[in-house]
Amino acid sequence: MSSSSAAPAAKPPMREALVAAAFRLFVERGYEQTTVDDIVALAGVGRRSFFRYFPSKEDVVFPDHERCLAEMTAFLAAGGAEHEPVRRVCDAARLVLRMYAENPAFSVQRYRLTKQVPGLRAYELSVVWRYERALAEYLRGRFVGLPDGTLRADVVAAAVVAAHNNGLRSWLRSDGEGDAGAAVDHALGHVQKVFGRSATAAAAPRVNPVPIGAPAEDPDDVVVLACRRDTPLWRVVRELERAFDRT
Amino acid sequence: MSSSSAAPAAKPPMREALVAAAFRLFVERGYEQTTVDDIVALAGVGRRSFFRYFPSKEDVVFPDHERCLAEMTAFLAAGGAEHEPVRRVCDAARLVLRMYAENPAFSVQRYRLTKQVPGLRAYELSVVWRYERALAEYLRGRFVGLPDGTLRADVVAAAVVAAHNNGLRSWLRSDGEGDAGAAVDHALGHVQKVFGRSATAAAAPRVNPVPIGAPAEDPDDVVVLACRRDTPLWRVVRELERAFDRT
């Protein structure tokens, strides 16, 4: 670790030193056996300095989530009507992935620690919940006026978080080997395919649902749908839903 | 409350008495201001009796989740290959709703309490997480061998939980007025439409995707799909995915 003071560091060095000391002790002694006093002694600072940066011992385990939540909220707020909503929340989720991928060794260490300590697991769940609410709030805004707008928003937000975490955890389980971005992109691609516009389809070709026969309630009616191959699946599904509901 | 001892009660009366005493004090004094000693004093039992039923003060707020989790796990384990998997996890989620709907006044009281006390919110998130994992584990088993089986399982489980909670919370916010079952059925119906077989389609009519033209990568290719009107949307989407991916 450099002690250069020529250029201001992006993060306060004391904060970094506290995180490094804490993780060294958590790994050596275990999380429960490490006190805040132990951490500040190793970092060579006072207790008050610790609590200036971290409200509790748990917070030092997740030093970057508050910053990331703020980034995500700002990113979503900066989105306009031109951004396809499902794509936008997938991109927002990628900000979380980037935070993990910036420091693979630290992320893997924390993953192992979190699996062992129920209190940290609970803390992580509450952080995940805040990310999910940020995505859902954004989507609720974008889905205003749609039928079941809040329901759809909540469901898509939960699906995006689950897919992100599926990709993230498979990377963490591989000890940070492999490509975190590719794992999460694949998982989020699945969600976009189910709910949103495909990433490759910038334009939105027209979908022509052509229900054949009388619009009766006969389930034997045949529905014929014709569309260009590059039509985003979400548009096909939306048109199909309309066609099917029109009985 | 009856003190009859003629027939054995379904739940131990002491357990019920502890829950009733706890909630009376939580409402009167606030959760944080109520101690386990206060609760046992009001219920007229000793501290040891409290801890025989509840590991902590938090657990008395959610007295039925362990039972409900066990019921859900048993219900899922009892499912066979004849049960459509998404439908099955939706039905499993309805067990949670039933627990809430059995006692509207208690559920609404707890909802308000949980919103006020961060520790209870964290506890609830960990319970919700356990429900979600139970659903996901079941789906992972059912989706073995499918492409992206674990990813799909995680995403569907998260979507089901989000939809259930959307319906449940709208009912709780209405102070337990209205039809909890209808709210949750509607929300779960949305998820089934996106991911699963529609509840009304017991049989599974064949879907015939007919990509017209050479199977080239030209996005101008037209895909024509014909299917019976009562085809479950999930089957149509699956066939469309295949047709679209076949380029």
Image (cartoon, coloured by chain):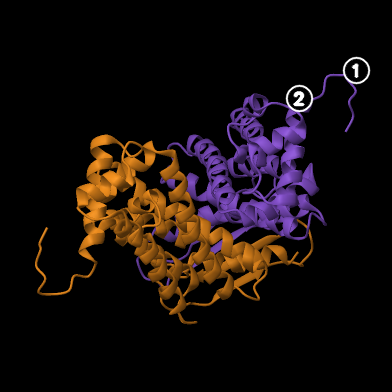
Chain colours: A purple, B orange
Q: Residue at (40%, 57%) from the top-left corner?
A: B55
- Is residue A208 visible in the rendered image? The answer is yes
**Residue under pointer 2:** A12
Q: Chain of mark 2?
A: A
Q: Secondary structure at mark 1?
A: loop
Q: Secondary structure at mark 2?
A: loop
Which three-letter amino acid code belongs to the residue tagged 1? Ala
Q: Residue A107 location, x and y as percent? A: 74, 48
**Residue under pointer 1:** A6
User: What whole-number distance in Å separates the C-alpha atoms at marks 2 and 1?
Assistant: 14 Å
In this rendering, is residue A74 above or below B24? above
Which three-letter amino acid code belongs to the residue tagged 2? Pro
Closer to the camera in the image, A112 or B147:
A112
Q: Earlier in the sequence, mark 2 or mark 1?
A: 1
Name the outermost residue toward the bottom. B81
Closer to the camera in the image, A56 or B222:
A56
Q: Residue at (66%, 68%) from the top-left corner?
A: B242
